[in-house]
Image (cartoon, helix red, strand yellow):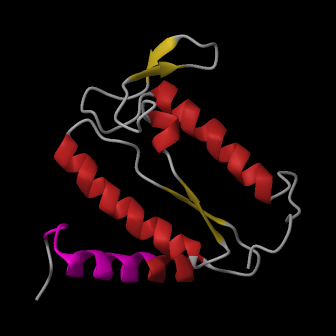
Amino acid sequence: IPVQQVSDPRWSAEYRRRVGAVMDQLRDGGRLVVWLGQPPMREPGFDGRMGLVNQAAMAEAATRPWVVYVDTTTLFGDPSGAFAELLPDAAGNPTDMRQGDGIHLTRAGGDRLAAHVMGVIGAHVDLAGAARGDAG
């Protein structure tokens, strides 16, 4: 019987199994997999469900050295980790990082995420092409 309620503990186990399977399929030689967590969501119930999704992905990534999990809470949350619509841009100006739906990123949010992800990748891979360390 399919489990459709995220709050059901069987859902988390099945989701973790599926996330792990995808991570395993992505493994290839020295490939680095960068897995992005979901940012805080405006609607509390949805945010809670995304928290379960993030926990599953973080747990599975922790068991696979070729996967780097990127927690986006610090990028898009307020100091307590809750949803924040306005955050400082590269120049320090308060900027809309999220679209009106409280879910998707604006262009500024996408730029913020891309800059962070490039830093994460650069910590593991020479962006000119040579691997740094063993990614698995």
Comparing 20 with 74, the one in front is 74
Query: Residue at left 55%, top 39%?
Result: 113
For this orientation, the residue located farthest to the bottom is: 1
Query: Residue at left 57%, top 79%?
Result: 63
Q: Where is residue 3 in the image (x, y as percent from the top left)?
A: 15, 79
Query: Residue at left 20%, top 39%?
Result: 43
9 falls in the magenta region: yes
In the image: residue 127, left or right of residue 19:
right
Position above or below: 4 against 53? below
In the image: residue 50, left or right of residue 44:
right
Comparing 43 with 115, the one in front is 43
Specify the quadrant of the image occupied by residue 61: bottom right
- Please identify the dominant SS of the magenta region: helix
Q: Position of residue 75 (x, y in %)?
A: 52, 37
Quadrant where the N terminus sits is: bottom left
Specify the quadrant of the image occupied by residue 32: bottom right
Q: What stretch is highlighted in magenta?
A: 5-19
For this orientation, the residue located farthest to the front is: 80
Give the number of marks: 0
Specify the quadrant of the image occupied by residue 70: bottom right
Query: Residue at left 31%, top 62%?
Result: 52
Quadrant where the C terminus sits is: bottom right
81 falls in the magenta region: no
Q: Where is residue 11 in the image (x, y as percent from the top left)?
A: 23, 76
Q: Position of residue 38 (x, y in %)?
A: 40, 50
Position above or below: 13 against 48? below
Position above or below: 21 against 41? below
